[in-house]
Image (cartoon, rainbow, N blue to C red):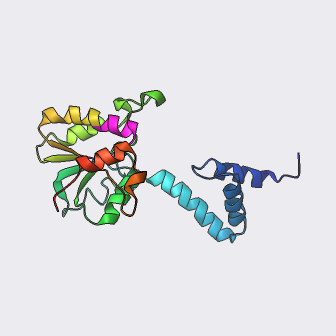
Amino acid sequence: MGYQVLPLTRLIEHFERLPGVGKKSAQRLAFYVLNMPREKALDFADAIVEARDKIKHCRVCQNLTDQELCPICSDEGRDKSVICVVEDPRDILAFERTREYNGLYHVLHGLISPMDGVGPEQLYVKELLGRLRDGQVKEVIMATNPTVEGEATAMYLSRLLKPVGVKVTRLAYGIPVGSNLEYADEVTLYRALEGRSEI
């Protein structure tokens, strides 16, 4: 084996374990951290530990927060009659960037995937059902990704929610702006036709 500095090797290995970080990126990040002033490196380490210790799930929607309720659930100006169901807290950030949606959210923290051993009981499904008991919610939007697992989860939840008496809708999927029809696959074209609207 060549020359190795054990603490540096450990740091590189830890960065490599992060999703989407390969060996070269891990090395670049490790050397960046090594070149930080000690105070900044300690502040970085503290931020990781503090986030890990203080961030938890919102008791209502399961979004990430450092309070009992996330800022969206505690916002009195939000439309409480609509819940948008998403797979991951990052999906909320995407919707919030549009500034068009003013309802509430519910984070499943995953999708039904029998191949990976993930069933409905591993997701926050019963918490979603609990939110519908008071009759205030009129519509639940299924905003899971258009993958096999996302579709299966949306269909499962749809069948579960219909008897409760709420309207269950699915995000329309279609042709991305700026793309050509000839490159679209059959499912995308079908979804685009299905989700068409009057102009």
Which residue of the protein is positioned furthest toward the right in this rendering? 2
Q: Is residue 103 left or right of residue 14?
A: left
Residue 148: in magenta span: yes
Query: Residue at horizontal 27%, vertical 39%?
Result: 127
Query: Residue at horizontal 39%, vertical 43%?
Result: 109
Residue 198 at least partly seen? yes
Q: Position of residue 106 (x, y in %)?
A: 29, 47
Residue range of the region highlighted in magenta in the rendering: 142-154
Q: Dividing the image into 4 quarters, which one contains the C terminus?
A: bottom left
> How many labels sit on residues?
0
User: Is the residue 156 above or below the residue 20 in the image?
Assistant: above
Query: Residue at horizontal 82%, vertical 54%?
Result: 5
Task: Name the residue nearer the viewer: 107 or 99.
Answer: 99
Which residue of the protein is positioned furthest toward the front in this rendering? 182
Task: Name the residue nearer the viewer: 171 or 61.
Answer: 171
User: Is the residue 7 above or below the residue 133 in the image?
Assistant: below
Residue 111 at least partly seen? no
Q: Position of residue 37 (x, y in %)?
A: 69, 72
Q: Position of residue 23 (x, y in %)?
A: 70, 52
Quarter-wise, where is residue 26 in the image?
A: bottom right
Residue 60: in magenta span: no
Query: Residue at horizontal 36%, vertical 40%?
Result: 150
User: Is the residue 56 above or below the residue 100 in the image?
Assistant: above
Quarter-wise, where is residue 90 in the image?
A: bottom left
Q: Dividing the image into 4 quarters, which one contains the N terminus?
A: top right
